[in-house]
Amino acid sequence: MRVKKFEAKSMKDALRMVKAELGPDAVILGARENKRSFGLAGESSYEITAAVSESTLQKKRFVESRLKDDDREKFRTAGASAQKRMIEKMVDRRLLGQRQEQQERDAKVSAVRAQSLSSRPRAITAISYIDIQDDAPVQPVYARRAAHPEPRVRARESQGGLETVRPAKPLQSPPTDVRNRIRSLAREALEAGRPVEMARNVAATSVTSATAKSQTADTQEIDSLRGEIQRLQGLLEGFQKVPQTFQGASHPGAEFGLGYDFSRSYQKLIETGVNNELAAEILSRASQEIDVMNAKKPSIVEAWVAKWFLQNISICARPLSGKVHVFTGPMGGGKTSQLVKTAAQLVIRDKKRIAVVSTDTTKVGAVDQLKIYCQILNVPFAVVRDKADWQWLEPQLQNVDHILVDSPGLALTAVDEIQRLRSLMPPTDSASVHLCLSSAMKEQDALEAVRRFRIVQPTDLVFTAIDMSVQHGVIATVQLRSGLPLHSFGLGPRVPEDFEVATKERVLDLLFKLSSLRK
């Protein structure tokens, strides 16, 4: 299945792009209006996410490849119904031509086979030399004897008591030329029959020896089969003793009970970095909702998986609402950079009055770095070292719209680190706590960080270093396992350009590499 995003100044232009690129059968997955610039008058644009199956797209490309330049342009600008009729007409014509070519090839093969059969030599008749006549047509021996049976009588010879059969009437002597012809034919038959008789004797001897050998071979084969059965029984007993986890996986996902039809989609989810158990859970649900015939079509299964992510990924409804925003997380999570990017969004785009507060006094240069950024943005800056500083600072910040707080990067493995982080948190219950994690982290490390930072009650997740990661499945896995919605993404080191508010479509884009990282 091919999924792609289109962006234009108007919805009509975006739909026209979808039809020109994916064809009239494209399915619209989502549409939205967004702002693109930081200027005073932000330019609106419309974004559409559409999808189409590979087979439908190949039909459209086939039709375009067979058209001339002028006809191709008319085809692209035509209505959806006209495009569909033209595609069906040309594809049906192509299929009809292929069937006719196949029928012609089959006819040629049948003709060659019939000719080869007719050219084979005819079978030799079983008529003896004596019964062959010069001018009369050949008649089988059994037919002549049945038509003119000779009466025979049985007589017993006086000597030896042997019983012989002889004709009832004496046969008349044939003419001389016939007798000479019969003698010559009999002599030829005798000479020809000697090698045959010798071959018969040899064959009889061979049959006798072959019978004895076959009996010996049968006995040996029975003994061999018995030994093979015993060996297979031993292997079966040993196989039954193997743990259940090793008995098995003939295809990806088989250990979770997934059928072969879903193995390809399972492998794709694993390659994107999605957790094995989560991928198996998604496709197990897909196997229950997709019928057997559609499950054999990879495009339908992939479309169902994409729809599942769009329905189940959780996103912050109002990511920049609230007055106090705390950026926390482990060391190297990109808290300071994401705070500065968020501050630039609020000041330049939304025209908000903000203040920046730093509680990270342990990292060398952290306070100076934030101070320089605040001078560039022309916003107030303060440093908090303990809870008493908050009591003095709160009255001073009554007139600002947002307060952005940078917290220190701690591992939270010791009790004193936990107590210190709690003492530096703002004394308000309405603060939005953004847990910043790197998308290059391992899944287990990210989930462990979420578990440790539960003490500060994070409200959402921020994933940074999107450009440093190849597999972005950790984003979906951590969000679904933790239940915390996604707030925003950090796409790179540039400030303030590499900032993006999280959306469901963007998560799907990162999972399946539908577009570039930067718009």
Image: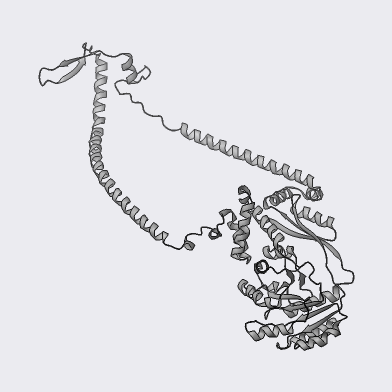
Look at the picture and state if 390 lies above or below 301.
below
Q: Residue at x 47, y 60 (%)?
A: 247
The answer to which image quadrant residue 139 occupies is top left
In the image as oriented, which residue stretches furthest toward the left? 159
Looking at the rendered structure, the number of numbered marks drawn on it comes to 0
The answer to which image quadrant residue 272 occupies is bottom right
Quarter holding the C terminus is bottom right
In this view, the residue in front, 370 or 182, is: 370
Instruction: From the viewer's perspective, tell me whether residue 246 is left or right of residue 193.
Output: right
Q: Residue at x 63, y 59 (%)?
A: 282
Look at the picture and state if 163 lies above or below 59.
above
In this view, the residue in front, 70 or 421, is: 421
Residue 41 location in percent, x, y?
A: 89, 69
Q: Residue at x 26, y 20 (%)?
A: 182
Quarter holding the N terminus is bottom right
The reply to whether residue 495 is in sight is no
The reply to whether residue 265 is in sight is yes
Residue 157 location in percent, x, y?
A: 13, 17
Residue 188 location in percent, x, y?
A: 26, 27
Residue 125 location in percent, x, y?
A: 36, 26
